[in-house]
């Protein structure tokens, strides 16, 4: 289900719609233990966010504050009808899995989303903890692929292509 971070659109249903695949939309926050204490948020359906929390804690806990790690098990419902509910659309720095997951940075203000199509994004400030951002980006990207792995019936095809080529080469050389 598409993440629609907006207070004016119900095109994809309200965030509290329990019939949404994966459940209602929730947000989990993670604070960097870097000098600036950057706060990152993930927003997705309940099932996806809960699964991502485990992956993030397993891979990025060295970059997170202890309070953030302790609070990770308590994500908050996302209120799409409130202008104060976080994250806001202009805070999103990355979308994943066909825009069903969003990663935001508190304090980032990408005003280009309110401009004409093709307007360049506002650069992410240098004060954002790049190490934690990279860890979150890599972890979410790997933990939530767009599609599942290749089915076992197709997995062996590339290995058999070499054999098929060899058989064809032998057959062709016998004809010559």
Image (tube, grey):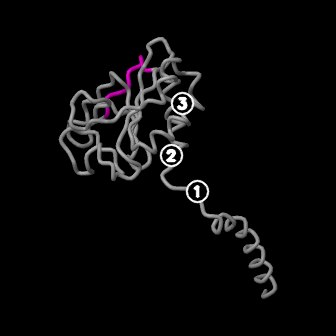
Residue occupied by mark 1: 149
Q: Which image quadrant is residue 124 in?
A: top left
Magenta span includes 76? no
Image position of 165 with respect to 24: above or below = below
Most prominent secondary structure in the magenta stretch? loop
Please report the residue visible at 36 percent of the width from the left and 51 percent of the height from the top.
Answer: 1
Residue occupied by mark 2: 144
Please report the residue visible at 54 percent of the width from the left and 30 percent of the height from the top.
Answer: 135
Q: Is mark 1 on a helix, strand or loop?
A: loop
Q: How crowded is mark 1: few (under 14 residues within 10 Å), some or many (20 or more)?
A: few
How many numbered discs?
3
Q: Quadrant of the C terminus?
A: bottom right
How many angstroms separate mark 3 from mark 2 (CA)?
A: 14 Å
Q: Residue 52 carries which label?
A: none
Image position of 19 with respect to 133: above or below = below
Residue occupied by mark 3: 135
Front position in the image: 136 or 131 = 136
Return the x and y of residue 106 as percentages of the image width and height. Answer: 35, 23
How many angstroms separate mark 1 from mark 3 (CA)?
A: 22 Å
């Amino acid at each position: 289900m598409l993440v629609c971070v907006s207070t004016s659109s119900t095109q994809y249903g309200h965030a509290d719609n329990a019939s949404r695949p994966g459940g209602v939309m929730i947000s989990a926050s993670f604070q960097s233990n870097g000098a600036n204490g950057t706060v990152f948020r993930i927003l997705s359906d309940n099932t996806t966010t809960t699964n991502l929390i485990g992956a993030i804690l397993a891979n990025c806990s060295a970059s997170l504050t202890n309070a953030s790690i302790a609070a990770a098990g308590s994500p908050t419902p996302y209120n799409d009808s409130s202008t104060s509910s976080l994250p806001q659309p202009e805070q999103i720095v990355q979308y994943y899995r066909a825009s069903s997951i969003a990663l935001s940075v508190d304090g980032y203000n990408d005003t280009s989303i309110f401009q004409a199509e093709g307007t360049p994004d506002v650069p992410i400030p240098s004060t954002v903890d790049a190490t934690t951002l990279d860890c979150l980006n890599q972890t979410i990207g790997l933990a939530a692929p767009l599609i599942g792995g290749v089915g076992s019936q197709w997995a062996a095809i590339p290995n058999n292509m070499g054999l098929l080529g060899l058989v064809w080469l032998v057959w062709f050389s016998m004809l010559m």
